[in-house]
Image (cartoon, rainbow, N blue to C red):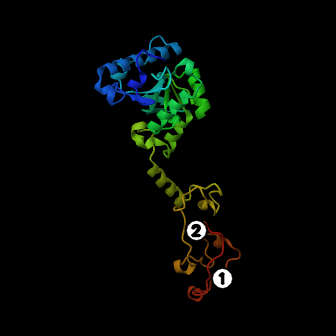
Amino acid sequence: MEFPFDINQIFSERVSILDQTLVAGRRSAERPDLQGHIATVIDELGRASAKAQQLTAPITSASKLQSQRHQLYLLKDGESSGGRGVVVGFLKVGYKKLFLLDRGGVHIEAEPLCVLDFYITENLQRHGYGLELFDFMLQHKNLEPMLMAYDRPSPKFLSFLAKHYSLTQSVPQVNNFVVFEGFFFFNRSGLSSSPLTDQGMDGFFGPVEKGSPKKAGRRDQTLLFNGERSGTSGTEDSPMAICSSSFPPAIGILPVLPLPQHEILPQQGAPSSRPAFLPWMQQDPEPTVTSHRSLQGKTQQPTGSRC
């Protein structure tokens, strides 16, 4: 999109980040006439986006950006138009408090980062500009696309998300926003490795559905030592259940010491009241224990399988 003024003079960077101040750099902050040009660019882009989406009124304008705490990423091509530059498109995002339904129909209150408007000039589409702009926003926000919500995405935008980010399975909502299954997966597990940490789980999800990685770790340890959770390589009754590789190395590893030191040798003729989870305690037949003193110094280290 071309304008009668020099785009490179207004926007010094290839991707400029605008907010309610309508400032694209130190130069535009010192010159009010440049801020007027910035408002003109935003208004023209908003009208073009509304027309492409067949909306009755633009949802992006300079006045709306000044009154709302949103951010607008503007992409330019500084080498076109005889070195004056052209505007390629824009992407507007912002945080919104939403009431969402997960796949099971449970209501969740969340305040995710939302894509509110996304537009690339028609004659510059299918040149990789949209992917460049969207990736820039993700890196700037340090966020994964599955953790975002999308306000009334067009079929073309949904195809864009499916092609470049494999976002295909959306969860139906009663509002105009679209969220994908990964959005609720990270909420349920509480173990997200994505950049949810920069905004905090407390601020992202409501108190009903949020999880704590520390609490999850303590819960796993409790289940481990109570014998109520099995691993992937055995069942709950199997002696190898607590040796599963699904647990961290620091959890559930018992020191292997000579049996007489801990006085855990089975007594002759006495049935065991607890399951034998040590491999060497399952060997048949059991040795006859005459006395504890006579075995001292003779008992060798068991050679059975270890965790």
Query: Which image quarter is the C terminus in?
Result: bottom right
Crowd around label 2: few <14 · some 14–19 · many ≥20 (10 Å): few
* Quarter occupied by residue 61: top left
Determine the secondary structure under disc 2.
loop
Q: Is residue 57 above or below residue 147?
A: above
Earlier in the chain: of badge 2 and badge 1, it is 2
Pointer 1: what residue? 288
Q: Position of residue 27 (x, y in %)?
A: 33, 28
Crowd around label 1: few <14 · some 14–19 · many ≥20 (10 Å): few
In the rendered image, is residue 168 in sight?
no
Which mark is in front, 2 or 1? 1
* Quarter occupied by residue 302: bottom right
Q: Is residue 157 above or below residue 194?
A: above
Q: Amino acid at mark 1?
A: Thr
Pointer 2: what residue? 273
The residue drawn where x is 64% and y is 56% is 235
Taking the view exactly as shown, the residue that stands out farthest to the bottom is 294
The residue drawn where x is 46% and y is 39% is 142
Q: Position of residue 39 (x, y in %)?
A: 37, 18
Taking the view exactly as shown, the residue that stands out farthest to the top is 56
In the rendered image, is residue 8 in sight?
yes
The residue drawn where x is 56% and y is 73% is 256
Q: Amino acid at mark 2?
A: Ser
Q: Is residue 291 above or below residue 8?
A: below
Q: Position of residue 4 (x, y in %)?
A: 42, 14
- Residue 303 lies left or right of residue 70; in this view the side is right
